[in-house]
Amino acid sequence: MPDANSPSAAPNPHLAPYQARGLKGRILSGVQPTGNLHLGNYLGAIRNFARLQSDYECLYCVVDMHAITVWQDPKELGAQTREIAAAFLAAGVDGAKNAIFSQSAVPEHAQLAWIFNCVARVGWMNRMTQFKEKAGKDRENASLGLYAYPALMAADILIYKATHVPVGEDQKQHLELTRDIAIKFNNDYNAPDFFPVTEPLIFGAATRVMSLRDGTKKMSKSDPSDYSRINLTDDADAIAQKIRRAKTDPHPMPETAADAEKRPDADNLLGIYAALADRAKDEVIREFAGKQFSEFKAALTELAVAKLGPIGAEMQRLMKDPGHVDSVLRAGAEKARTVAGPILADVYKTVGFLKP
């Protein structure tokens, strides 16, 4: 997949309206409201949302429709949706400038998804590795939504004709499918360039945050040990305690990147420090080479508290004011629908649906 930041990337005819406004394009990105946002969610996605808003027209979606592809407690789903919106705001996303909304509040997502269900091929869906991972061995009992949700993900992006999507390793395959659906729709309906072939937005070396209890496993909200992760709502004392108890090995800090790669727990903590400090990991390795873990952990604690503490405090404040968060979501949905509505109308006309 080409990097949209590369000078060799093919010109995108959908970019001209944004370039005329001094922008690089339009972004759509989303986060599932499944609770317990942690450091991995922040470094992998949410902090970039605020960084992108000066260069792109941004739509940030809480993908509650994706969440119910596996059963969610209805009593918790609304609160978790607000938590994600609060995290966006606490991380610095401007809710007045950008659209922050829940996916279900913009019905055009689901309407376009059905059309894409009819454009996408079963063979394409069968290749989606995330379905295989999430469904496990008992695929016959998985929901149809879980199987088909990559078509909804394509609709999430293309209902806004988004020119760019921030992607991590686990989303590259879905963006490839989105591009395939866009190309097939354009070809099937003899509508060249109707949908953009959305480009990935890649932020250099990916920050893959691993468990604080096991450096070989990804940090996860489903891990039974709360000490395996730093939650975005953790206060300074909780952050400090978790870093102190983070798994290490009996040796001093690694002296080279090659040494660090052989020691996953140390490598993970070095990666977290580098990401929070916006520094190259090699530079961090050189700074702490040969020092004791206790000295490094003290520095990491100070950095993490400084970076994450204000975000957690603001999230807690916002979550105590659900009326304000709901007003942001409502305004965002209205803004999103002003973009999505005309595009869906054009899709319906292209497909041949009669105007109601």
Image (tube, rainbow, N blue to C red):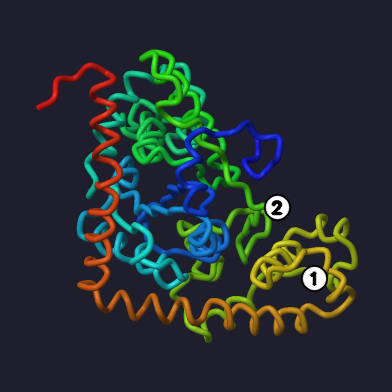
- The CA span between labels 1 and 2 is 15 Å
Packing grade of label 1 (10 A; few <14, some 14-19, many >=20) is some
Work out whether 295 lies above or below 264.
Answer: below
User: Residue under circle 2?
Assistant: 205
Left or right? Give the position of 21 relative to 245: left
Work out whether 236 lies above or below 279.
Answer: below
From the image, which quarter does the N terminus lie in?
Answer: top right
User: Residue under circle 1?
Assistant: 284
Work out whether 169 lies above or below 140.
Answer: below
> Residue 170, how many percent across, how many down?
56, 42
User: Which numbered disc flags the more N-terminal residue, 1 or 2?
Assistant: 2
Element carrying mark 2: loop
Depth check, front residue: 318 or 138: 318
Image quadrant assignment for residue 40: bottom right
Work out whether 169 lies above or below 44.
Answer: above
Q: Residue at x 57, y 41 (%)?
A: 200
Element carrying mark 1: helix
Q: Residue at x 44, y 20 (%)?
A: 192
> Residue 319, how many percent across, how many down?
30, 74
> Residue 317, how many percent across, how many down?
34, 81
Q: Residue at x 65, y 45 (%)?
A: 5
Depth check, front residue: 155 or 36: 155
Instruction: Identify the amino acid type marked 1.
Output: Val
Depth check, front residue: 41 or 166: 166
Residue furthest out toward the left = 356
Left or right? Give the position of 128 relative to 119: right
> Residue 238, how many percent across, how many down?
51, 81
